[in-house]
Image (cartoon, coloured by chain):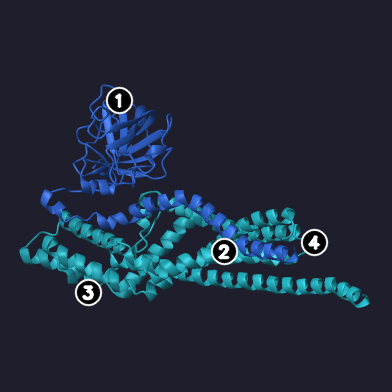
Chain colours: A cyan, B blue
Amino acid sequence: MKKVSTYLPSLILSIFLVLALFGSLAMTIFDINVTAKKAKALSEKKELSSKVITQLNKHYREQAAATGIPANVFMDNISEEYIDSVIDAYIDGTFTAMKTNRSLNVQVPKNPAMEEALEKFFGDYADSIGYEKNEAFYRKLDNTKTNAYKNIGSCCDVFKASSLGKHGLLSKASKLYRLRPLLTFASVGGAVLLMLFILAVNWKDKRPFLYWTGIAAVISGIFGTVPSIYLVSTKYFDSFSIKQPQVFTAYTASMYRLTEAFMAVSISLLVIGIALIVIYGVSYRKNKRIADSTHSAPEKNEADTN
Amino acid sequence: MNKQKKNSYILIHVATPFIVLAMCIGIILIISIKPSDKLKVYKNLIFMDELKLNPDNENIGLKIKDNKIIEDYKGTTAEDGEFIRPAYGEMYAVMKSSGFDLSVPVYWGSNIDLFERGACQGSGSVIIGAEGNTVISAHEDTFFSDLSKLRKGDTVTLSTNYGEFTYTVRELISFKKDNNKYVSPSKDTRLTLYTCKKDILGSSDERIGVICDLTEKKFYTELKEDEEQ
């Protein structure tokens, strides 16, 4: 701290250390929280399936006038368990696409009960009006089944993976997702390396190492904590204008969870940083006191002799 | 003297964290300008599915149709072939470019709802691959956010269900919105892409874009029945 030759390199290294620590923090949180397992757990916890059912019910009620198929033909056979399985299929499909950098390929699980109900409804209606069950009849039935699976799939794609895929964004997300381990390793490794450089620069008197690492930890902690507190306290993500309730809940709940995790780790880093600075301050004062007493002792002796 | 030295040490210790903080804020701001712009575009693209349901569509009779476009055709191709004419409101092509990050759906017709879904081609211009001026435009905060990045020599590929057409950027253009010079019919075969010029104070009267020459055309010759439909 006393010499420019150690101060300036330490200052520059600590700036890079702030960025490396912040990157490590972000990558670790991303690594731990962005998994298929966590996404499925969130979907279950937030009861997205019941929101999807409400949406589907609304859709089929509106469509009933145009198609002539009552909503209950579909809805009586769509359970929350079934919707959960479709949501899970989409989440698995999304993560598989990101891991393999292939396009999204989701097979909506079959619902034999719903298919049977549609067959019965179509059959009964055809019988009631004397409609011949010819090729056209079965084609219409198949179309209705296909569209039903499409609608269910579209409502259950709570993380909008299809939209991401459609505009080429899934491949971008995939690139980032596959680089995740490398980025985590690079940022954590970089942080460790920078700390070693700071230690090397302050090799003669190692105590400033605590100071420089401390301020880097405090600042990266502040960078993580302040925006997180703002986002959580103002309920920022609630202002998203997403019309489908299940998509809104899936995105906002994920964002809040990531932000809260980020905030917790940032606060820990802030506390560690403050602790390092305090340790440095205490050792600095202690050392100064010893130095002062060794300097003043000869003066005292000189005074005594005089 | 000693006291003065002591004070300067304290000052350095206190001021240093603020210096580091200020420099880091500067670096982070500079680094995050571009990604935050991109994030805005991505957010618009992902969530706009929810915004494009306009009940007025029912009244004006607009039927939007999203077709599945062939993008991995492996059959034989020919220099000449037949065009499949789209209906108004129909998605009939996907645009990709060496200078683009996105794949952009192209709709036949232009309307506020179609602009929410992709790039639009006014029905006054010629169909993709045909002789004349093919004019396509889109919003600058979504599908054409990267249009200004295109440079001379960049390629723009349009895949349709009747063929794949590659255009090469010949000229970068800029014009006022009421100037029809670039969007009028032309004798040569060209593709004109344009969007609004980015303006922080709202919509801009200036348009920017590119003119491209058709450099490669491949008409699909082995189409399945359902693909033709």
Q: Quadrant of residue B78?
A: top left
- What kind of element bears circle 1? loop
Q: Quick check: A20 above or below B170?
A: below
**Image point 60% across, 62% down: which residue?**
B17
| Image coordinates for residue A56, horizontal then vertical, percent | 24, 67
Which numbered mark, 1 or 2, is in the foreground of this view?
A: 2
Please state if B107 lies on the left or on the right of B97 as rendered: left
Determine the chain carrying the residue at label 4: A
Q: Residues within 10 Å of mark 4 (few under 14, many from 20)?
A: few
Q: Earlier in the sequence, mark 2 or mark 3?
A: 3
Q: Determine if residue A303 is in view.
A: yes
Residues behind callouts 2 and 4 on a single chain: yes
Dots 4 and 1 on the same chain: no
Residue A277's place in the image compared with B190, above or below, is below
Pick the residue in front: A56 or A273. A273
Residue at numbered disc 4: A204
> Residue beneath label 2, please?
A219
Q: Are marks 3 and 4 on the same chain?
A: yes
Residue to which mark 3 is pinned: A76
What's the amino acid at mark 1?
Thr
Question: Which label sits in the foreground, 2 or 3?
Answer: 2
- Return the mark for residue B189: 1
Residue B219 left/right relative to B10: left
Coordinates of residue A272 in the picture (x, y in percent): 61, 72
Indicate the chain on which mark 2 is placed. A
Marks 2 and 4, how far apart in space? 26 Å
Q: Tell me: A214 left or right of A109.
A: right
Query: In the image, what residue type sits under mark 4?
Result: Lys
Front one among B60 and B7 = B7
Nearer to the camera, A257 or B107 = A257
